[in-house]
Image (tube, rainbow, N blue to C red):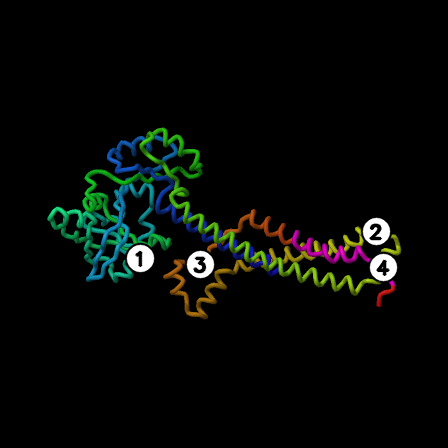
Amino acid sequence: MLGVTVLIIVLSVMNGFGNEIRSKIVDTQGHLRVQSSGFISEWEVLSEKLLSRDEVVGVAPFAQGPVMLQFRNQPRFPIIQGIDVEREATVVELSKFIRSGSVRDLDDDSVLLSSSLALGLRAGVGSEVEIYSPLLLDRLTQDEILLPRSVQVVGIYETGWNQIDENTVICSLSLMQDLYGLDENVHGLKIRLQPGVEIYSVIPSLSDLLGPSYNVMSWLDSNRDFLFVIQMEKNILFFLLLFIILVSAFAITSSLLITVVRKMKEIGLLGALGGRSWQIGMCFCVQGFFIGIVGTGLGFGLAFLGLHYRNDIVHTFARWTQSEAALLRFYQFSDLPSYTSIQDLVIIGSASIVISTFAGLIPAWRAAKMRPAEALRSE
């Protein structure tokens, strides 16, 4: 029961975190990305081609790369992303992530800072920050000095995805093109599809539409390594927690072996009355199966009860340990996400019942080997 309960709760929470992260990726990156081996110069033409497809809702250009950001002599090295504010709204609803300020105020002389980056710099809306372009080193080799670009912070945003909130700056596309010397070029295009459209069914047709010079990638492909780590963590936790059920199986085996020793006369009597060895052995296999059924059922009930009250438990624990602020700051959640997969329930339930049934095999084999005459003479 406890093994099944812990497995369901842990895997449901891991599934919840996985779904939250996948949702954040789509909300911040769109469903698809179009990139090339170099810069994309004719991105407006490509956007019109993509928008002509019924499956496509929005297309937005972007350019991104590392820069040095300085505020009050505090340097940071974030990733800066240049966007076209109007087109970006059709792909990413950036306004819902704004914690202070406004996206409408973003222009060529202003930026948006991610929450953790702003907290580390102690910068807020209205602060003046300086951006140093990577072109600075290239210009120095040509005996030129490239001065930093002074911009104003017009907004602080927080997506809830730590990878973005830790170290990201958003600026206008024109500002990013100036910082990187891109002229009118961009690094890629973001695409949002209609709800319910199967992503991988659209990619081949869009690739044919754009031509071989461009690579169309889904958000799954772009974040494959990160999502693989999440799935690996879930599989490792399942493997480790399965040992709880295996330990309980040894307990079932030992208790049934004790029952065999205590019931030797009864076993001998069954054999003397005509019971066959396999029939006597099945009595103990059925006991293991029954324990598995009852334990799994109670484990399911206890797990669903725990998942229902999970947030109350987390909040109570956080208040007792005074760690509510830490949960929000480092893990970006106050409520514990959860998603219970039917596949996980089937695997956990089947595994626990099968293991419990097999736990009765050794006692069954021991009972089936007994000779009725010897069993009846035992004290």
* Disc nearest the viewer among 4 and 3: 4
Q: Position of residue 77 (x, y in %)?
A: 26, 55
**Considering the image in quadrants, where does the C terminus appear?**
bottom right
Asked if the stretch drawn in magenta spans residue 367, the answer is yes
Q: Residue furthest front?
A: 141
Q: Position of residue 73 (x, y in %)?
A: 19, 62
Inter-mark Cα distance, 4 to 2: 11 Å
Label 2, on which residue? 276
Nearer-the-camera pick, 88 or 102:
88
Q: Quadrant of residue 119?
A: bottom left
Q: Are marks 2 and 3 in contact (CB under 8 Å)?
A: no
Q: Quadrant of residue 181?
A: top left
Q: For the residue marked with disc 3, what is the amino acid? A: Asp
Q: Secondary structure at mark 2?
A: loop
Asked if the stretch drawn in magenta spans residue 348, the answer is no
* Disc nearest the viewer among 2 and 1: 2
Task: Name the disc covering residue 335, or none.
Answer: 3
